[in-house]
Image (cartoon, rainbow, N blue to C red):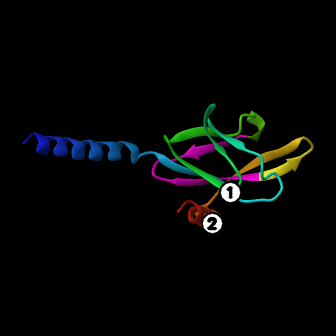
Amino acid sequence: MKKMNKILLTFALLIIGSTVFAQDAKVIVYRKRCLYGSLAKFQVNVDGNNLSTLKNKDMYQFNLAPGSHMIGPKQEKRQITLNAKSNETYYVKYKTMIGLFGARPRLKILTASEAKEDAKMLMDKKM
């Protein structure tokens, strides 16, 4: 009986947890493979919090609460604003740009169709 209660409690918590997070937006941040600037690592910051670091041909996925969020590296002038809506998926591409003092990221929000080929290439790498 105790085992059955634990199973039912676990199942109930999974259902409750999935409905809470179903309102979040899904964000996929990625960086395609490129020869120049391939050793550079770019930070993924959301609203000032460092979530991850992107290497060459890398991807990071996370959930965001609906609303306006700043996404990008630590330098504010290179960040972009994402207006997240619940149950939507957003693709943010980190493009490597070469500058006078090294590689810098340029961010762009893409639609699913624009990111389809890039995402497919990255998903093949992860599997």
With respect to residue 96, does 124 lie above or below? Answer: below
Crowding around mark 2 (Cα neighbors within 10 Å: few <14, some 14 to 19, many 20+) is few
Splitting the image into 4 quarters, where does residue 79 fall?
top right
Earlier residue among tags 1 and 2: 1
Q: Which residue is drawn at 56% across and 63% down?
A: 123
Q: What residue type is labelled 2?
A: Met
Magenta portion: prevailing SS class: strand
Q: Where is residue 3 in the image (x, y as percent from the top left)?
A: 13, 43
Q: Which amino acid does label 1 sit on?
A: Lys
With respect to residue 30, does 121 lie above or below? Answer: below
Farthest residue to the top: give it.
48
Q: Where is residue 68 in the image (x, y as percent from the top left)?
A: 58, 39
- Element at label 1: loop
**Can residue 80 be seen here?**
yes
Q: Nearer the viewer, residue 16 or 39?
A: 39
| Left or right for 126, reference 11 | right
As for residue 85 lying within the magenta part, the answer is yes
**Can residue 47 be seen here?**
no
As for residue 101 lying within the magenta part, the answer is no
- Element at label 2: helix
The N terminus: image quadrant:
top left
Residue under label 2: 121
Splitting the image into 4 quarters, where does residue 45 fall?
top right
With respect to residue 40, does 51 lie above or below? Answer: above
Residue under label 1: 57
Proximity of marks 1 and 2: CB atoms separated by less than 8 Å: yes
Q: Which residue is drawn at 77% across and 59% down?
A: 34
Magenta range is: 79-95
Q: Residue 117 carries which label?
A: none
Q: Nearer the viewer, residue 40 or 24?
A: 40
